[in-house]
Image (cartoon, helix red, strand yellow):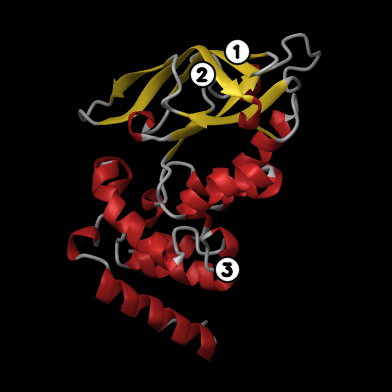
Amino acid sequence: MNLHDTPEQAAFRQGIRAWIDRKVPPQMKGRDEALVTLSKQELMPLRMLLAGEGWLLPYMPKQYGGAEFDPIQTIIFMEEMAAAGVPYIEARGSGIANITAVLLRWGSPEQKERLLKPTLAGTIFWCQGYSEPGSGSDLASLQTRAAVTPEGFVIDGQKIWTSRAHESDWIFLLARTDPAAKRKQDGISFFVFDMKTPGISIRPLITLDGRHYFNQTFYDHVQVPQAGLVGELNKGWTVAKALLVHERLNSPGANPNTLAR
């Protein structure tokens, strides 16, 4: 029992706790190390279990596959998942909370229909193409380029520390579409595209403990259709900043109660 809960919140908490006890397999509890040790294949049963309840991202609108939890319900849900050691954050997939927030705000109706629903149904696994070998802490200095063509864009460049790129279905990526822009923050655009698109290659980055979680990804004349642009052309820095704020606010440490095990 949480002494700060209202009676309604206490009943909600008990319902979540009972669901975890009843539904989550024992092998998926007490798995705090799951951030890097569990593969996509191992995470999928939990992912689909949550998606079936609308709980992959429970605060999202029901029309896209969420459960429309209010902020307190969402915190209670995360607290109970953390208390049971269920790898909820990673079960969402790399960056799923970030890309869904972006699509909800900036996505076209077609992008929402094509990508939001299957993402919240658990069938699209995402990775994020932000960092580059020479643009780590200074993201705005990125050099990956997207040339504008009559059909869409052609992307050339490379990204690094791309978490789970080798297991992902789609990527959201920043690329420079106006190299002549006066400010380095300008002339950047935000893209989404299928990781099976020709021209993408992946090189694993093995950590000292022998794990394959991170990757370096290369883009050689990768053709992305116009529908792959999210938001306005050359206005991707606005999207990127909002995404990073969302990422910080939705990290496990943003709610101190989720740190208690």
Q: CA distance from mark 2 to mark 1?
A: 8 Å
C-beta proximity under 8 Å, tags 2 and 1: yes
Where residue 146 appears, x then y in whole percent? 63, 15
Callout 2 crowding tier (Cα within 10 Å): few <14, some 14–19, many ≥20: many
Q: Earlier in the sequence, mark 2 or mark 1?
A: 2
Closer to viewer: mark 3 or mark 2: 3
What residue sits 52% from the left and 52% below the top? 117
Q: What amino acid type is highlighted by mark number 2?
A: Glu
Residue indicated by mark 1:
143
- SS category of the residue bearing label 1: loop
* 91 vs 255, nearest the viewer: 91
Q: Residue at x 65, y 50 (%)?
A: 104
Q: Position of residue 161 (x, y in %)?
A: 42, 26
Q: Quadrant of the N terminus?
A: bottom left
> Sequence order check: which comes first, mark 3 or mark 2?
3
Is 181 placed above or below 16 here? above
Residue 20 placed where, x, y %? Answer: 31, 72
Mark 3 is surrounded, within 10 Å at the Cα level, by few (under 14), some (14 to 19) or many (20 or more) other residues, namely some
Q: Amino acid at mark 1?
A: Gln
**Residue 85: which quarter of the image?**
bottom left
In-image side of 81 versus 179 (left or right): left
- Which amino acid type is marked by label 3? Glu
Q: Which residue is label 3 attached to?
A: 68
Left or right placement of residue 85 versus residue 117 in this view: left
Q: Which residue is mark 2?
A: 132
- The alpha-carbon separation of the residues under discs 3 and 2 comes to 36 Å
Most extreme residue toward the front is: 151
